[in-house]
Image: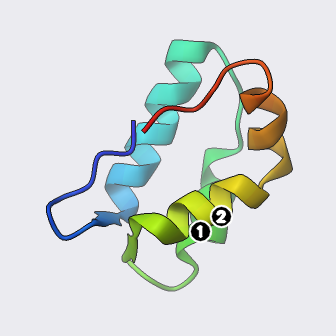
Amino acid sequence: MLNSNSSGVIGKKDFKKALDAFNQQNETELDVDSIVLEVFKEQEIVDRSDIRRELNQNQDIQDLAATEPIQD
């Protein structure tokens, strides 16, 4: 899901598209805009490890992951 380029970073638009696709594929209702703001703050691109850390701290995602593991 969270493919990044060879430098290990991902852009805000690509991350949002990945979360939107995740919602559609899994019939979930994650608050995509809120998650994107939380992860990216004022940046346009972030390191993939920062995204993983933020997702691991998001309770909505953790609740979902308990039933459906999130894949990279």
Binning the other alpha carbons within 10 Å of mark 1 as few (below 14), some (14 to 19) or many (20 upward) gives many
Where is residue 70? Give x, y as percent.
58, 32
SS of the residue under disc 1: helix
Tell me the residue that label 1 is attached to.
Answer: 39
- Where disc 2 sits, the SS reads helix
Residue 34 place in picture, x, y as percent: 69, 58
Extreme residue toward the left, this view: 6
Q: Write the residue at 49% across / 34% down.
A: 20
Three-letter residue code for mark 2:
Glu
Q: Kindly indicate the quadrant of the structure image that contains residue 53.
A: bottom right
Q: Is residue 14 left or right of residue 42?
A: left
Residue in front for this viewpoint, 45 or 66: 66
Question: Which residue was labeled with disc 2?
Answer: 54
Which quadrant, please, contains the N terminus?
top left
Measured along the vertical axis of the image, is residue 50 above or below residue 58? below
Label 2: few (<14), some or many (≥20) within 10 Å? Answer: some
Q: Nearer the viewer, residue 71 or 26?
A: 71
Question: Up-down: is 52 above or below 63?
Answer: below
> Compared to 64, does 56 lie above or below?
below
Left/right placement of residue 8 relative to residue 44 reads left
Q: Residue 67: x and y, percent?
A: 77, 18
Residue at image coords 38%, 45%: 2
- Left or right, 1 with respect to 3, comes to right
Amino acid type, residue under disc 1 in the picture? Val
User: Are the residues flagged by discs 2 and 1 in contact, CB closer than 8 Å?
Assistant: yes
